[in-house]
Image (cartoon, rainbow, N blue to C red):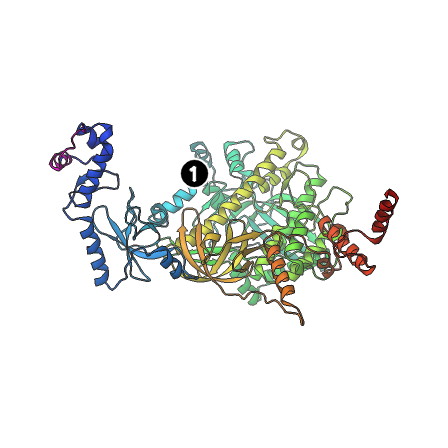
């Protein structure tokens, strides 16, 4: 005999004290497990009639007496009053018929709170009202514009539930919290230890005692040119015209090594940081602020300890001699790059002399070969509250090149001095590009290699000596940069085909500069490699052979690794700012350029506001299936035949933004640049055209990834040794078949006539 079920009054009496989940309620009523299904059905009926309701935590509590049917009718009536449309889920056939080619699954709407736990969203485009899915955390704030997706209601067959398509944490966070989380996640140091602070507090402004044994340049006209807003000034320049028509060029650098003892806690902390980390909203210094912006910094009108590279140049700015020594300087003009240009226009003699000598220095570099990459760096503007409002390209004035040429020649002399004195120097080396990377660039952008001055087969020839300099590859890259012109997409792709510069204890050469000797001497406040070189240049007598506090090889490895990490952090920090600007523009449409394609999606960039983002293949509108072809660098739609390549213009919609990680997701709504038209040859049959289309589709999908032998005739500099074996074998078989047909052989046979004759003779002998 079946055990009885409790009455509705008993259930209501228990739930009047506290809400319970089904298992707790069944235990409180003393029901056995075999009554579970019947009891659940009873509870469901009570919920349907409004006697009970179920919370997001699956707990039953007393209802408001309104049945589920009455709630649905009330919601539909509300929609009708607002002029909206019915949001009930249509039948499968109807859904298929109503699918639009340009409709994205991400929608946009405004959140409204119905009661304590229930929320709904009003879609902006259609006015439809959708119930929000229950979650432990509120989906957002009242009146907030959100992006959301729909999925079928688990209980009501003809309705949808809405789900917020981003995390509340990423959108409802303040800018100060974003900055703090960014610093924490990237393990950026917050402050210096108490011991270091105590040591730095004891450092005083330099005086006569500190200037003993130094060469005095305080009466010299010394210029310090830096970007606007710079706090640490570590380099200055002086130019003197000599009676013989030559020049005396002085590069004066802050003497940081005088204040940072080797092997001290401060030195170890500086090595651990390796660099000053520059972020759009702040800078994480390598050295404490009292040193970086105070005692060491070369401010105008105050005496400072410096390390000088004084060079004597002839009338053509060729370096005749140089000398490194400690000095004392007093900056006569501390100006910005923009102010330097204005002073040049006004006829300032010191600026004119600087521009004159640097023009000659650059001319000398051009004779040896010059690679000038045109790439844009970006900065961020902030409002009064300190929040990002605009991403802007950084301006580069003519005066930038004046300072750059002086720093380059000083670094070159530093490397030569380190080698000449056999010191344990740290050198900046740059290896020549790998042949595989060059060939990959050739397959993706063959037009860049048109009329190249060198043969690609010469790239792999062995070079004599222990050097990274490669004249053949250097000439090729000069040609590639010239062919790329102002196209930043091509320029970035050329840069990615090159090796990454790094530090080494041997002077193996710098490929991009085309110099055998190059080091870093000019920025010891923000780079540890420069601080190390200063210490080495200051060594005399027994100090040269003395044991160093750190191994030079280990230091090179550490600062090279930290450089890569810092570059990634700086790149992401700009994206964090751009995503913060975009966070209130979810659902907006933008014109964008395709900047890259990978197996997981398409990267796009929008011009206003300047930002980058990812389009996952599933977020491209329509019912197509996209495949990435790495050989051709494109995404191909298997159903539509539509392709996406770098440089294509597209219309995108912003779907998701995560300011914490600097990530933005877009959806491609439309391709604005036209597909390349296929020319129809005169007299070409339909079958031939269809075969050609199928072949093109197969190649785009990667089934025919190797080019035919005819594809290589476009460039005279391509050597047959680089043709893949598969392509050569295919060409050989095709040639054999053509010869066989000319001699009357069968079309389907792969053998020539001689093989056929031998086969027939063997058969006759056997008979």
Residue holding disc 1: 191
Looking at the picture, does residue 201 appear above or below residue 463? Answer: above
The N terminus appears in which quarter of the rendering?
top left
Q: Which residue is nearer to you in this view: 159 or 341? A: 159
Looking at the picture, does residue 277 appear above or below residue 718? Answer: above
Q: Residue at x 52, y 44 (%)?
A: 566
Q: Is residue 163 visible?
A: yes
State left or right for residue 491 relative to residue 566.
right
Q: Which residue is nearer to you in this view: 264 or 426? A: 426
Q: Residue at x 84, y 53 (%)?
A: 753
The C terminus appears in which quarter of the rendering?
top right
Q: Where, by quadrant of the figure, is residue 100 drawn?
A: bottom left
- Looking at the rendering, the stretch of residues picked out in magenta corresponds to 1-15
Q: Is residue 512 visible?
A: no
**Residue positioned most to the front:** 767
**What SS does tag 1 mark?**
loop
In the rendered image, residue 121, in percent from the top left (x then y), is placed at 28, 54
Looking at the picture, does residue 428 appear above or below residue 331? Answer: above
State left or right for residue 89 relative to residue 254.
left
Q: Which residue is nearer to you in this view: 217 or 253? A: 253
């Amino acid at each position: 005999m079946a055990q009885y079920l409790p009455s509705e009054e008993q259930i209501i009496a228990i739930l009047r004290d506290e809400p319970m989940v089904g298992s707790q309620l069944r235990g409180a009523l003393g029901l056995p497990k075999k009554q579970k299904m019947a009891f659940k059905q009873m509870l469901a009926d009570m919920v349907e009639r409004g006697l009970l309701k179920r919370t997001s935590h699956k707990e039953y509590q007393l209802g408001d007496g309104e049945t589920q049917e009455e709630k649905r009718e009330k919601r539909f009536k509300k929609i009708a009053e607002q002029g909206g449309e019915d949001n009930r889920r249509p039948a499968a056939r109807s859904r298929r018929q109503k699918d639009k080619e340009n409709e994205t699954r991400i929608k946009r709407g405004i959140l409204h709170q119905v009661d304590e736990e229930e929320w709904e969203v009003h879609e902006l485009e259609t006015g439809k009202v959708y119930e929000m899915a229950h979650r432990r955390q509120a989906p957002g704030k009242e009146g907030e514009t959100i992006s959301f997706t729909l999925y079928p209601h688990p209980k009501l067959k003809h309705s949808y539930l809405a789900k917020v398509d981003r995390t509340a944490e990423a959108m409802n966070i303040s800018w100060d919290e974003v900055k703090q989380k960014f610093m924490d996640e990237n393990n950026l140091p917050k402050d210096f230890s108490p011991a270091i602070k105590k040591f730095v507090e004891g450092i005083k402004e330099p005086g006569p005692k500190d200037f003993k044994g130094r060469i005095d340049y305080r009466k010299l006209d010394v210029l310090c040119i830096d970007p606007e807003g710079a706090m640490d000034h570590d380099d200055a320049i002086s130019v003197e015209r000599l009676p013989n028509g030559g020049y005396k060029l002085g590069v004066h650098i802050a003497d940081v090594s005088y204040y940072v003892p080797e092997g001290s806690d401060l030195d170890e902390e500086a090595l651990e940081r390796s660099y000053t980390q520059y972020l759009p909203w702040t800078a994480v210094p390598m050295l404490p602020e009292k040193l970086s912006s105070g005692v060491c910094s070369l401010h105008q009108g105050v005496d400072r300890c410096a390390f000088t590279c004084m060079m004597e140049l002839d009338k053509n700015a060729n370096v005749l001699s140089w000398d490194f020594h400690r000095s004392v300087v007093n900056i006569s003009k501390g100006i910005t790059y923009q102010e330097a240009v204005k002073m040049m226009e006004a006829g300032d003699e010191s600026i004119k002399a600087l521009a004159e000598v640097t023009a000659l220095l650059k001319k000398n570099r051009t004779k040896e070969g010059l690679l000038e990459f045109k790439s844009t760096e970006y900065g961020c503007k902030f409002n009064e509250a300190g929040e990002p409002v605009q991403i802007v390209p950084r301006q580069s004035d003519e005066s930038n090149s004046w300072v750059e040429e002086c720093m380059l020649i000083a670094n070159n002399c530093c490397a030569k001095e380190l080698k000449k004195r056999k010191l344990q120097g740290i050198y900046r080396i740059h290896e020549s590009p790998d042949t595989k990377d060059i060939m990959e660039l050739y397959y993706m952008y063959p037009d860049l290699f048109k009329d190249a001055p060198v043969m690609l087969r010469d790239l792999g020839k062995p070079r004599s000596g222990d050097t990274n300099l490669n004249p053949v590859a250097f000439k090729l890259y000069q040609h590639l940069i010239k062919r790329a012109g102002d196209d930043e997409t091509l320029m970035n792709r050329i840069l990615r085909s090159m090796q990454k510069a790094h530090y080494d204890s041997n002077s193996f050469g710098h490929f991009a500069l085309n110099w055998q000797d190059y080091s870093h001497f000019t920025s010891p406040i923000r780079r540890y490699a420069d601080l190390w070189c200063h210490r080495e240049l200051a060594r005399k007598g027994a100090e040269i052979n003395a044991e160093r506090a750190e191994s030079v090889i280990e230091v090179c490895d550490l600062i090279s690794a930290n450089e890569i990490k810092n570059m990634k952090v700086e790149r992401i920090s700009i994206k964090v700012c751009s995503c913060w600007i975009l966070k209130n523009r979810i659902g907006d449409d933008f014109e964008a350029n395709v900047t890259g394609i990978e197996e997981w999606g398409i990267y796009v960039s929008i011009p206003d506001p300047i930002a980058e983002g990812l389009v996952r293949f599933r977020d491209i509108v329509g019912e197509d299936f996209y495949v990435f072809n790495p050989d051709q660098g494109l995404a191909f739609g298997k159903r539509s035949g539509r392709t996406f390549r770098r440089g294509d213009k597209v219309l995108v919609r912003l779907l998701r933004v995560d300011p914490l990680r600097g990530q933005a997701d877009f959806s491609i709504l439309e391709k604005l640049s036209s597909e390349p038209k296929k020319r129809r040859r005169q007299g070409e049959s339909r079958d031939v055209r269809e075969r050609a289309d199928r072949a093109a589709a197969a190649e785009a999908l990667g089934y025919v990834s190797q080019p035919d032998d005819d594809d290589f005739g476009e460039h005279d500099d391509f050597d047959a040794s680089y043709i893949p074996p598969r392509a050569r074998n295919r060409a050989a078989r095709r040639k054999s078949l053509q010869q066989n047909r000319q001699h009357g052989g069968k079309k389907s046979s792969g053998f020539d006539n001689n093989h056929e004759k031998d086969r027939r003779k063997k058969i006759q002998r056997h008979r």
